[in-house]
Image (cartoon, rainbow, N blue to C red):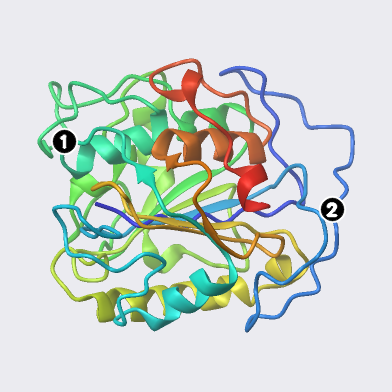
Amino acid sequence: MLLVLLVALATGSVACSSDKAASPATTTTTTTKAAVTPADPCSSSGKAPTKYAHVVMVLEENRTWSGGRSPEVGVGFSGGKMPYLAGLAATCSYYTDWKETNGKQNSLNQYIGLTSGVANPNTVFDCTPSASCQSTDNNIFRQIRSAGGTPRTFVDNATEPCSPGKNAAKHIPALYYQGGDDASFCTKEVLPLSKFDPNALPTLSFIVPDLCNDGHDCSDETVDSWAKKTLTPILSSKDYLAGDTLVVVVYDEDQPVPNLLIAPTANKGEISSVAGSHADLLKTIEEVLGLKVMDQGQLPDAISLRAPSGV
């Protein structure tokens, strides 16, 4: 299961009409000054930018809001063990209901769903990347690359590119994509977490904490501490403080899946009028980066999360 932290910066969006590279946009996107502080990151009364230039996703594991198979964190991280994330939930947005890609499958199928929209029948039961365990579907990494952007996966507890290191391959979807030219970019695009710089973000930063920091093997307190350490530099960056950053936190499975949307313009508090899902999140990522929504898997029926949350 995973917690996704999605950061989007509106200073130069990626545009794409299909899987082919798009020419740089000739128009300028107008954004509203956020006027927020790191201590109060969702307090702007301005409008959300139409497009963003960067997305950062951070992933965690093995929790549910309540009533699922996994340990409960409490709706809005209200269980008392995650004060940092609870503080963000109190001032930003979260959905009280959220559906994973495939409720009958393990982590890998959810990660593939989050990045392609497809409940792929070949990436099941947390299999290891191989000729029989792979996806050739289009995916957000390929979309961004084809549009001239820079997708990157940053792996905690890895020291070499294109490697899980001491992390888990099943939590690194880029290792499973073998369609098109995906495999040839692995060394360039799958990097140790030590290479991540919140002040020099690529178009997409897909951050994979290790099995302790993601909650798989360790406590909620550990996850919360790691999330604070990881999020604070992002929420303190000049791009976020200027109103150009979106952060989405989401676990990968066990409905209702914990989630959190952080942006200067995010609406305060819970969203219960509609449910969210992994497919909805992927569609929203495509929208904020100016990409065409892929016509595959669960995406044709997905909704945008932007209006309900104010991001």
Residues packed near mark 2 inside 10 Å, few (<14), some (14 to 19) or many (20 plus): some
In this picture, is 75 found above or below 20? below
Q: Quadrant of residue 60?
A: bottom left
Q: Is residue 150 left or right of residue 275?
A: right
SS type, badge 1: loop
Q: How many numbered marks have been drawn onto this rendered protein structure?
A: 2
Residue at left offset 26%, top offset 61%: 158
Q: Could you tell me if residue 260 is visible in this image?
A: yes
First along the sequence among labels 1 and 2: 2
In front: mark 1 or mark 2?
1
Amino acid tagged 2: Thr
Q: Which residue is mark 1?
A: 105
Q: Evaluate whether residue 175 shows in this view.
A: no
Q: At which x and y percent is residue 283?
A: 53, 33
Image coordinates for residue 240, horizontal then vertical, percent: 69, 67
The tag on residue 198 is none
> For mark 1, does the 10 Å Cα neighbourhood hold few (<14), some (14 to 19), or many (20 or more) residues?
some
Q: Is residue 101 above or below residue 306?
A: above
